[in-house]
Amino acid sequence: AQSVTQLGSHVSVSEGALVLLRCNYSSSVPPYLFWYVQYPNQGLQLLLKYTTGATLVKGINGFEAEFKKSETSFHLTKPSAHMSDAAEYFCAVSGYGNKLVFGAGTILRVKS
Amino acid sequence: SAVISQKPSRDICQRGTSLTIQCQVDSQVTMMFWYRQQPGQSLTLIATANQGSEATYESGFVIDKFPISRPNLTFSTLTVSNMSPEDSSIYLCSGAWGDGYTFGSGTRLTVV
């Protein structure tokens, strides 16, 4: 079984500051890990994913995440926040061919 | 990656009625899933749609309320039965193959 915990339902950063959204997972099988973004009244957009191989994964819009097995974490970062990054971010976990389980989501606010 | 066409995109329904949501995938996918996203909430898995057999429902969801069909590897429907205002949500279908998932654009349902 898989589960995801996202620490912090709301995160606020200043424009140009580092973005760090935290995600910890639990999985009984080797995990596949995902970050999705959802803008208001829009669908889900895949930011990045980790399946196997390199543990540092680069995604769209300057985001990246690092899979740390020892810490069961997959935190999302971006060096410099932009106003357009304001959205809700979901971390999700699955095993190969299995259902995708989502975290509760983190709303990112970017202050000018 | 595959593209999922989901319809209707939105609907307003009377309580006590039923609505069927359709998802068509442009290629064969091994597994399909149905999610619910209640206002301000994350995505909750309703069921896994299995081709040629009954769907597998998550805890808290039952077939009488959310009957699902999956007649082939490219199509699935979800029916929301005997609706009440509490069923007002966004419903999304998802297809999985290999290490990837694709989502439909969602059906925004309002029950009045």
Image (cartoon, coloured by chain):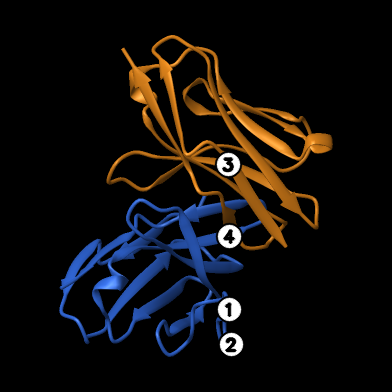
Chain letter of the blue region: B
Colour applied to chain A: orange
Say what amino acid the circle numbered 1 marks: Asn
Q: Residues within 10 Å of mark 4 (few under 14, many from 20)?
A: many
Residue B14: image x %, image y %?
15, 79
Per the model, the C-alpha gap separating discs 1 and 2 is: 6 Å
Per the image, label 4 sits on a secondary structure element best described as: strand
Residue B65: image x %, image y %?
40, 85
Question: In the depicted view, which residue is nearer to us: B78 or A71?
Answer: A71
Per the model, the C-alpha gap separating discs 3 and 4 is: 23 Å
Comparing labels 3 and 1, the label whose residue is closer to the camera:
3
Comparing labels 3 and 4, the label whose residue is closer to the camera:
3
Q: Chain of mark 4?
A: B
| Residue that numbered label 1 is attached to | B50
| Residue that numbered label 2 is attached to | B53
Q: Residue furthest top?
A: A16
| Residue that numbered label 4 is attached to | B96
From the viewer's perspective, is A69 left or right of B73?
right
Name the disc covering residue A6, or none. 3
Query: Which sits earlier in the primary sequence, circle 1 or circle 4?
Result: 1
Number of numbered discs: 4
Q: Residue at x 63, y 31 (%)?
A: A75
